[in-house]
Amino acid sequence: MSIYLRNAVHVDWRTLKFRRGHIRVESGDHGGLHFIDDIPLVKDLKDEDRILDCRGKLVTRAFACGHHHAYSALARGMPPPERPPEDFQQKLQYVWWKLDRALDPELVLMSALATALECARNGVTFVIDHHSSPNAVEGSLDTIAGAFAEVGIGVLPCLELSDRDGDPVREKGLAETGNRLAAGKPCLVGLHASFTVGDGLLRQAVQLASKYLSGLHVHAAEDRIDQETTFARYGCRVVERLQEAGVLEFSRTILVHGLHLDKGERAILKDSPAWLAENMESNLNNRVGVFSGEGLGDRVMLGTDGMHGDMLQSARAAYLNGIGSEKIGPAAAYHRLRRVHDYLQENGFAGDDENNLVVLDYPSPTPVDKENFLGHFFYGLGSRHVDSVIARGKLIVENKKVLTVNEEEVLALTRAAAARLWLKMA
C-alpha cells in the first residue's frame, strides 16, 4: 500500500529545507517516503493506494508527545472539588487521585479512545503515555494500546506504580507491567514520584526495567514537596535518589517535569543517558513553577501532561514561556519538540518513522520558506491547519475527518462515560 502526495511542499523536520514535488509514502512500522517524478495513473494503482492533492499545502513529519496522561481525558469540564486545593499536594488528593481511583475498565477504554482521537485530529501520531487506575489495573495497558491502535496512533504506555494505594494495588501494578514486558510488547516501568515511592518499590521497578531492557517513566521534582519529602525520608535530593537506585542508567528512562532541580542534579542528568520531558502548560496550571532547561543538556523533549493532545500548542507554550525562564530561541524550542522522535528511534521503538506525516493547509498572508519557517511555526501555525494525517503510511485523517473510527459515535460514548465518572467522583 502506498499514498501518493501530489504537488507537495515538503518541509524536512530536521533541516527545515523546502522541497516541492510528488511523494510516495510507504506503509508499515518502518516505511519511508520517496520523492518521485510522476504520480501513477489511476489504472496502475493498487486497490489500497491513495492519491492526495497537496497543492498549496505544507507536508512535514507528524508530531509525537513525550509525556501524556490519557486517563485524564474525561476530566475536561468536570465539576470542581468541594474544597478548592490550596497547594499541589491537595490538588493531587482532591482531583487526580480521586479521579484515577474512580476509573474502571470501561472508563480506561473511553479515556484512551478520547485521547487517541484528539491526537489524530492534531497531527500527533505517537504518544508516550503514563497511566494510573488503581482500581482497574489488570489489562489496563493492553486496553490503552488497543484503543490507540484502533484510531491508528502509536503508543508507548506504562502503568504508574506507587505505594500510596497500598500493597495489593502495588503488586497488581508490578504484575501488569511485568506481564506486558514479558510478552514483548512496548512498555516502560512507570512510577509516580519519589515522595510516593518507597525504597522497596523503587528497587523492584529498577529490577523489572533491567530484566526486560526497558526504562522507567517517573515524575521528578514537579513540586517542592517531592524534594522536601524525599530529603526528609531518605536524606538526599530526588535525582540523587534515582541515580543511586539505578533509574538513570537506562537510555529509555524518562524523567518528567524537573522544575525543582539544583545545579548538581542537573549535572547528574546531563551526564546520564536518561531523558526529561518538559510540560510547560501543566506546570503553569498547577502553579508549581516555570521550566528551565539550563544545565540539563540536549535530552529534553516536550509533552502535554494530559492537558490536551496538541503538540503545536505545547511547543508554543514552551517557547513563549521559555523566553523568560531560560532565554530559549525558536530553533531550540522546535528542537525540543522533535527530540521525542530521536528518543523513540534511538531506543528501538517502532511506529514513529518517516511515514508519519501531517498535511497542513496553511494559507499564510506572508511568504513561507526555510528562513522564516520557525516564525510561522510559532506565530502562525496551529492545529486548525491540520488537514490530513498519515500514520505508519496509513491515511487516518483526511480533510479534517478521522477515517479510522466513527468520531460522532466515539464522542457520544466518551461523553456518557465522562458523566458517569463525574457521578462516581461526587
Image (spheres, grey):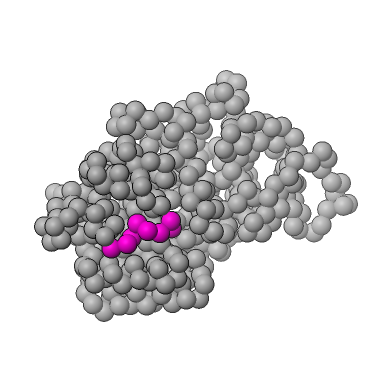
Percent x, y of residue 239: 26, 53
The quarter of the rendered structure image containing the N terminus is: bottom right
Q: Residue at x 32, y 31 (%)?
A: 326
Foreground: 88 or 94? Answer: 88
Residue 263 among those drawn in magenta: no
Residue 247 among those drawn in magenta: yes
Q: In the displayed image of the protein, which residue is found farthest to the top?
A: 366
Q: Residue at x 31, y 72 (%)?
A: 204
In the figure, is residue 404 to the left or right of 69?
right
The quarter of the rendered structure image containing the C terminus is: bottom left
How many tags in the picture? 0
The quarter of the picture where residue 372 lies is top right
Percent x, y of residue 46: 81, 57
The quarter of the picture where residue 160 lies is bottom left
The answer to whether residue 40 of the structure is visible from this angle is yes
Q: Residue at x 56, y 45 (%)?
A: 62
Q: Residue at x 29, y 44 (%)?
A: 266
In the figure, is residue 109 to the left or right of 27?
left
202 relative to 231, above or below: below
In the figure, is residue 333 to the left or right of 42?
left
Foreground: 382 or 334? Answer: 334
In the figure, is residue 204 to the left or right of 87?
right
Percent x, y of residue 99: 28, 63
Q: In the displayed image of the protein, which residue is found farthest to the right?
A: 43
Percent x, y of residue 104: 35, 72
Foreground: 225 or 71? Answer: 225
Span shown in magenta = 245-252
The answer to whether residue 305 of the structure is visible from this angle is no
Foreground: 100 or 59? Answer: 59
